[in-house]
Image (cartoon, rainbow, N blue to C red):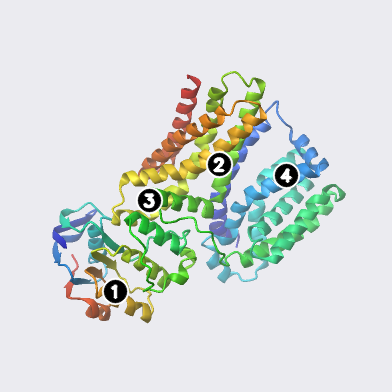
Amino acid sequence: MLNIRNVTKWFGSRRVLDGFSLDVARGERVVLLGENGCGKSTLLQLVTGVLDAFEGSIRVPDAIGYAPEKPDMPDHLLAGEWLDLVASLKRARLDDGDELSVRALLGRKIGALSLGQRQRVSLVAAFTGAPPLLVLDEPTNALDDASRARVTDRLLRSTALVATHDRDFADRIATRIVRMGEV
Amino acid sequence: MVRIVAATSGRAVLARAVPLFGAIGIGAAIVFAANGLRAAVAVRAMHESLGVRAAIWIVWIALATPATSAAFDAPGTRTLRSIARKSAALVACVVALVALVQAPMVALFARGDRAPAAVAVALLGTAACAAASVAWRSRRALAILAGTCAVVAIDRALPPLVAIAPAALLAWHAVREAWRSALEERPSTRIVRRAPPAIALAMAYVARMIRDARGRLQSSALVTSLGGGVLALSLRNDPDARPVQRALVVLALPISTACALLAAPAIETEARITPTLRATRTKPLTVALAMILAIAAPSTAFAGTASAVAAVASSAPQTVTIATMAWAAIIASSIALWARRASRARRSSTFLVGTIVIASAFTAAAASC
């Protein structure tokens, strides 16, 4: 499903990843743990194609559901417009279900949502089109307990690469935990 | 307090007011040229005719309100609100800031009338624009707007020195009310819908223009309308001498300016959602097409309307409108592609120089046909 081979990434003179390799098989949920600055988010951005200058090779499925640590949703759009836009870009249909209770938020501007509400909209956008691989960066940030439980349920039915500092959440969802060290 | 207001609201107001002032400056340079209209004549016409006065004030409030509203809802104002709750100094600073937006009207009255009239106009404009920016949320703002309209309507019955007192009172209360209710959430009409990727993306860019960059949208409409006015004058002299070619020559610069004004909000939105565009494997061609559609749709509509009105006013053939719309679409495509390229260079001067080159090239191309 996902093959990362000897990936090295530099930001100027700073090496963030050094020959990192990882395989994620179908049905696996790999959680990346590590201290701030160890390269978790950078690795996820390389996997999703957000960053593209690196050494090594990454093989990914055609469709990926990605939720960044800081959602990149424009403040001027309504939450429903953002989900429609993402569905259009993915050429997918929006899920009729409301597993993260975002229906009540669809008519509100993203700029007016709380951090937790934004995170829920961002996660629903990542789940849109039922992509074969989910790549989630700190998905439980700012979520309340009920939403956290729903995200956990959803992830238990998916193949995923997740970066988090939330040890309890990692233990619940992970089939494998990878510790990333400071480079 | 002055420095804090300048750094928060002031910066946001300036960002919206500068394009407006630029567009008005271009128009004023044409209308008030050496052999053109004199400021005193324009002001006298406003004093003598309620219709002229109402028309000019309505257009002005529509143009200046987006820049004014930035004083109340700019991101930094949240912190400012917590620092200076119910502060008279804060209201005074915001009144002064909003009065600066009235600079074009103040300049007109300072040249065409006397200083007290310019002061009264600055305060009435402040009251009207501040109240108009929150009129759909607050009944009190609506009442202040109505009161300001009443003062403008009676005009000559009030000598300027006497009018300053009620105008200052209205401006103070309008700014206080706008400050109080500006951050209340209001429902928005849905613009972006499920559609083919390029169209959905273009709708997201247009939504940004409509919701967050109304000043730019209005300025581009104004610039194109002025071009239409010049075209009408040109066609009126001789409607049959190559009207299509003259339309393309006259409108190349206004259309280029309008497109350039609309490019920034679209480019900013594209930059914001780049991670999603990459993660969803959106093709570069789709993204470029969306940018073209987003800039071409409003600019073509403005150009079509301006040329249609000019053609009707001068009894020229309507082929002028069709040709102008096609011309606008081509110019918009060039500006859109150039804006994307220049945004990668991260230098606004690169974009400006390119826009001037594009406008000159299209003007020269039309002239040589």
Q: CA distance from mark 3 to mark 1?
A: 28 Å
Residue A140 is labelled as none
Measured as percent of width and height from the top left, residue B239 is found at: 63, 22
Residue behind mark 2: B220
Between tags 1 and 4, which lies in front?
1
Residue B168 seen from this side = no
Q: Amino acid at mark 3?
A: Pro
Between tags 3 and 2, which lies in front?
3
Measured as percent of width and height from the top left, residue A55 is found at: 16, 53
Whether discs 2 and 1 lie on one chain: the answer is no
Residue behind mark 3: B196
Q: Amino acid at mark 4?
A: Ala
Residue at point 24% right, 62% down? A44
Question: Looking at this view, is B215 or A87 the one in front?
Answer: A87
Measured as percent of width and height from the top left, residue B138 is found at: 67, 65
Q: Earlier in the sequence, mark 2 or mark 4?
A: 4
Residue behind mark 4: B55
- Mark 4 packing: few (<14 Cα in 10 Å), some, or many (20+)? few
Whether discs 3 and 1 lie on one chain: the answer is no
Instruction: Please tell me whether residue A35 is drawn above or below residue B64 in the rendered image.
Output: below
**From the image, which quarter does the N terminus of chain B lie in?**
bottom right
Residue B300 seen from this side = yes
Q: Amino acid at mark 1?
A: Arg
Q: CA distance from mark 1 to mark 4?
A: 59 Å
Q: In the figure, residue B338 lies in which quadrant?
A: top left
